[in-house]
Image (cartoon, helix red, strand yellow):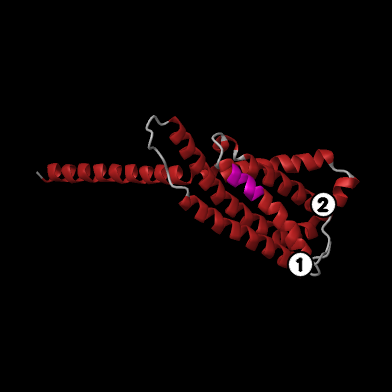
Amino acid sequence: MKDNELSVFETEGFFEEQDDSKKEKFDFEHFFKDNKSIIYTALFYSFGLFIGSYFYKIASTDTLNALLKPESHSVLSMFISNFCIYFSLYVLVVFLGFCLIGYPIINIIPTVIGIVTGIRASYLFLNYSTKGVGYSLIMLIPYIALFLTVIAFAIKQSTSLSKQLVSVTKSSEENSTFSIKPYVKKYLILALCVAVTALIDAGLTSLLYTVVTI
């Protein structure tokens, strides 16, 4: 009798463990579904890093090195330069959100960012060895990580917007519409984050340029 009771309890425990595992699996799938655009952004960025690093190794020239060499400028000039570059990429992400074919090609943006970062990092590593590593750790990686985070959330919004536009276009219902206001609000907040990123990059570069001499 005790053996039967034990087997029943063990069986119930077994099913409870199965339920827990299914729950964990479901949670992972739900997480991936909600954040797949961000995950794809990270993957395409990593792919761009590989391409950029390989490109620099096979196409390194004195002209390219002269373009990549860090130079000290005023905070204002660096901020204006950074903001123009960052905001241009951000606007492109927003523009693709309003296109019906935006979401299939939007991950070109993190790939481009990865390529440029890979080229710059390879330049520093191959030409300045340990100093180049230090320069990358304190003056390249922080603002790239911050900017990529902003772009990842912008891509998530643009992907959702583009898909909704496709859905509305294909819908047979005449009154099938959606509100653009939530997207506009989030885009404005992210645009402010782009400006803050450009300012942080300019300030950090100006502050640490004299510390890390390469």
Name the outermost residue toward the right. 62
**Percent from the top left, x then y, of residue 67?**
85, 50
Q: Residue at x 64, y 43 (%)?
A: 109
Residue 5 falls left or right of residue 202: left
Q: Which residues are magenta?
A: 89-95
Q: Which is nearer the eye, 37 or 91? A: 91
The N terminus, quarter of image: top left
Q: Mark number for residue 68?
A: 2
Task: Say if 76 sits above or below 148 in the image.
Answer: below
Res. 4 in view: yes
**Percent from the top left, x then y, of residue 70?**
82, 58
Res. 134 in view: no
Say if the magenta span includes residue 92. yes
Task: Say if 97 sits above or below 170 in the image.
Answer: below
Secondary structure that dominates the magenta span: helix
Task: Classify 10 Å Cα crowding around label 2: few (below 14), some (14-19), many (20 and above).
Answer: some
Q: Residue at x 64, y 60 (%)?
A: 195
Element on which disc 2 rests: helix
Q: Which is nearer the eye, 46 or 95? A: 95
Name the outermost residue toward the left. 1
The answer for how far apart the CA atoms under marks 2 and 1 are is 18 Å
Q: Residue beneath label 1, please?
A: 75
